[in-house]
Image (tube, rainbow, N blue to C red):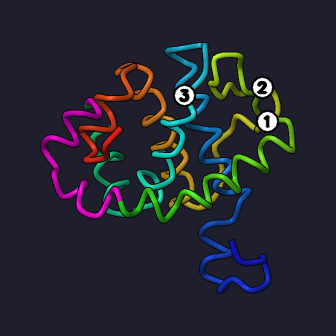
């Protein structure tokens, strides 16, 4: 990672660790609505590439009443470049998780899952229409990951070797 001031302004704005951390927090909360044990670390790596990619996010936002795997099946264009996007965004995910950990927003359980700590992140979803959509999609993705509850299935359906 380049130091903060050496990054282009676009990167600083879009991949701001606080904003990325908020997205990850929303996904953790969504996951915990169905599985109180917390989200597996390996699934947390998929959140930002799904939620920040505009075309993928718009597909998931439209089909929020649908199932995640059905959306992937009916919209294979979501998978174009997804493994590469995931790799490229890993450092931003780590940076956001580091900030969340420093602020005490989640804990790592004995089983290696990430579990949010209550009242550390505001529950109300506010911001620009786009940032609100990103947060809502993150919650949906987290909830769907918990419902599916199989990492191999998720990774395989997204074209990533587990």
Q: From the top left corner, tell me how far across and down residue 72 is, in percent.
A: 22, 43
Q: Main secondary structure of the magenta part?
A: helix
Q: From the top left corner, tell me how far across and down residue 137 is, in percent.
A: 45, 44
SS at circle 2 = loop
Looking at the image, residue 119 sits to the left or right of residue 13; the answer is right
Look at the image and tell me in which quarter the N terminus lies: bottom right
- Is 2 rendered above or below residue 16? below
Label pair 2/1, CB-CB below 8 angstroms: yes
Measure how far apart labels 3 and 1 are at the Cα level.
Answer: 16 Å
SS at circle 1 = loop
Q: Residue at x 25, y 47 (%)?
A: 159
Choose the circle earlier in sequence order: 2 or 3. 3
Choose the circle earlier in sequence order: 2 or 1. 1
Give the labeled residue for mark 1. Answer: 105
Residue in front for this viewpoint, 158 or 60: 158
Magenta segment: 67-83
């Amino acid at each position: 990672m380049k130091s903060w001031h050496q990054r282009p302004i676009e990167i600083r704005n879009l991949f701001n660790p606080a904003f990325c951390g908020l997205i990850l927090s929303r996904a953790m909360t969504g996951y915990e609505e169905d599985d109180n044990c917390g989200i597996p670390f390996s699934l947390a790596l998929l959140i930002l590439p799904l939620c920040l990619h505009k075309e993928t996010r718009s597909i998931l936002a439209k089909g929020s009443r649908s199932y995640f795997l059905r959306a992937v099946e009916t919209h294979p264009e979501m998978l174009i470049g997804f493994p590469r996007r995931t790799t490229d965004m890993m450092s931003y995910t780590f940076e956001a998780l580091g900030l969340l950990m420093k602020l005490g927003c989640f804990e790592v359980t004995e089983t290696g899952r990430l579990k949010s700590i209550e009242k550390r992140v505001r529950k109300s979803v506010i911001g620009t229409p786009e940032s609100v959509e990103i947060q809502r999609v993150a919650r949906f993705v987290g909830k769907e990951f918990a419902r599916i509850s199989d990492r191999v299935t998720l990774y395989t359906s997204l074209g990533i070797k587990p």
